Amino acid sequence: MASLKKTKIEITDGALIPEKDTNAVFSAWRISFFGALALIILLPIVTPDPYRKILEFLPDGILRTFEVTIFSIIFAFFIGLITGLGRISRIRIINRIATVYVEVIRGIPLLVQIFYIYYALGRFLQIPDIASAVIAMAVCYGAYLGEIFRAGIQSIPKGQMEAALALGMSRTQALSKIILPQTIKVVLPPVGNEFIALLKDSSLVSILAVSDLLRRGREFASKTFYYFETYTMVALIYLVITLFLSRLVGIMEERLRTGER
């Protein structure tokens, strides 16, 4: 009987990263990005009412979206780093706490976490809407980044830790001076993927009256009843931003890969 070769299939937001044919004139990324960008420019010219008004109404929402996303990914990065170290810790209780955190947070939808922090905990502690959004997203993505850091640390050959210990370094010194610097380089591309996913999920904070891109679009549509036009423009702006960021992550991956050769 012929042996079956096991194939691991991964479907994640990493699919957003442009493929090697990106530099081709009619690559999928170029068609999507420049097509969306052209529509954002042409629609307000061809049909000023309402597309130009929509475009003038949304910029502060775009800035708020980036504000929430950047603060969330910064806090999630540090939470993920601590969690990843906890997941590989030899201290049983620390390892167990980090593992439970990852399992619990990954098992609860982000929307539920946002509601819980803002409304449920609001019964005992009043947390501002933006702070609630940042906390919820940082805690949620911190669990995913924790697994990325754990995998990154474990990908570094064990011989490097053993060599550092043999040279008289403590385990903490070896981690901070040898293992973690290499780990950061390894995890940067997947962290970039999570940044893109977090940017898209930031649209969920509109339910907390945070004036992000989606919230501003909803406000305009509810006043003018131009729902189709408004959400078309919102979707195009999200698409341009995510495709642009995915291209940056793709360039970073390529440079890191080239630097390793």
Image: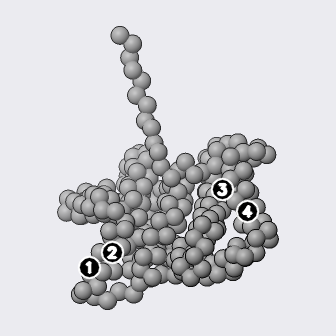
- The quadrant the N terminus occupies is top left
User: How dense is the environment of label 1, judged by Cα within 10 Å: few (below 14), some, or many (20 and up)?
Assistant: few
Name which residue lies at 79% across and 46% down. Answer: 25
> What residue type is disc 4 on?
Leu
* Residue 247 numbered mark, or none: 3
Q: Earlier in the sequence, mark 4 or mark 2?
A: 4
User: How dense is the environment of label 4, judged by Cα within 10 Å: few (below 14), some, or many (20 and up)?
Assistant: some
> What residue type is disc 1 on?
Ala
Q: Residue tagged by mark 4? A: 39
User: How dense is the environment of label 3, judged by Cα within 10 Å: few (below 14), some, or many (20 and up)?
Assistant: some
Q: Nearer the viewer, mark 3 or mark 1?
A: 1
Q: Residue tagged by mark 1? A: 120
167 or 108: which is nearer to us? 108
Q: Earlier in the sequence, mark 3 or mark 1?
A: 1
Q: Nearer the viewer, mark 3 or mark 2?
A: 2
> What residue type is disc 3 on?
Arg
Q: Nearer the viewer, mark 1 or mark 4?
A: 4
* Label 2 with label 1: CB-CB less than 8 Å: yes
* Residue 159 numbered mark, or none: none
Q: Secondary structure at mark 1?
A: helix
Location of residue 40 with respect to 61 vertically, above or below: above
Location of residue 9 with respect to 64 vertically, above or below: above
Most extreme residue toward the top, as rendered?
1
Q: Position of residue 145 (x, y in %)?
A: 42, 60
Q: Secondary structure at mark 3?
A: helix
Q: Residue tagged by mark 2? A: 115
Q: Earlier in the sequence, mark 2 or mark 1?
A: 2
Q: Earlier in the sequence, mark 3 or mark 4?
A: 4
Q: Secondary structure at mark 2?
A: helix
